[in-house]
Image: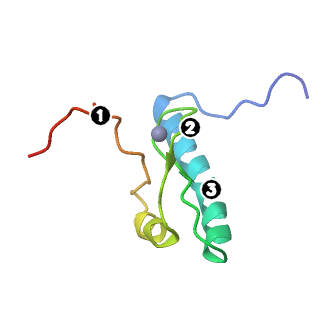
Amino acid sequence: MSGSLQPPFGTREQRIAYNEAWSRTINEKAAEWKLGREPMPDFRCECWKEGCEQRIPLSAEDWKLARAKPNRFAVAPPTTSPTASRR
Ligand SMILES: [Zn+2]
């Protein structure tokens, strides 16, 4: 074996799917841990951005709702201007 281990995909879509699945795996491990103990709000963002370090404050129940649908991911809310107004 030589060189670095390269994931066997070449398209952006495949990489995105890989990132999402990877984040989900980590979050599922976290969920298992949380469900048995006190809740700690630091789920990893599952957005498509490679290397995204955002954390999402979810309870274990929120997480179960988020993962209830296979096409739904726990993604941090977009960073908006603090002056943005809502109507
Ligand atoms: Zn993200």
Q: How far apart are marks 3 and 2 (CA)?
A: 15 Å
What is the quadrant of residue 76 in the picture? top left
At label 3, which amino acid type do we have? Thr
Mark 3: give few (<14), some (14-19) or many (20+) Cα within 10 Å: few
- The chosen color scheme is rainbow
Give the spatial CA distance, label 3 vs label 1: 28 Å
Residue 36 position (above or below residue 51): below
Q: Mark 2 points at which residue?
A: 53
Which residue type carries mark 1? Thr
Give the SS element for disc 3: helix
Residue 27 or 83: which is nearer the viewer?
83
Q: In this rendering, is residue 69 above or below 17?
A: below
Q: How far apart are marks 2 and 1 (CA)?
A: 17 Å
* First in residue order: circle 3 vs circle 1: 3
**Which of labels 3 and 1 is toward the front?**
1
Amino acid tagged 2: Glu
Numbered circle sitting on residue 80: 1
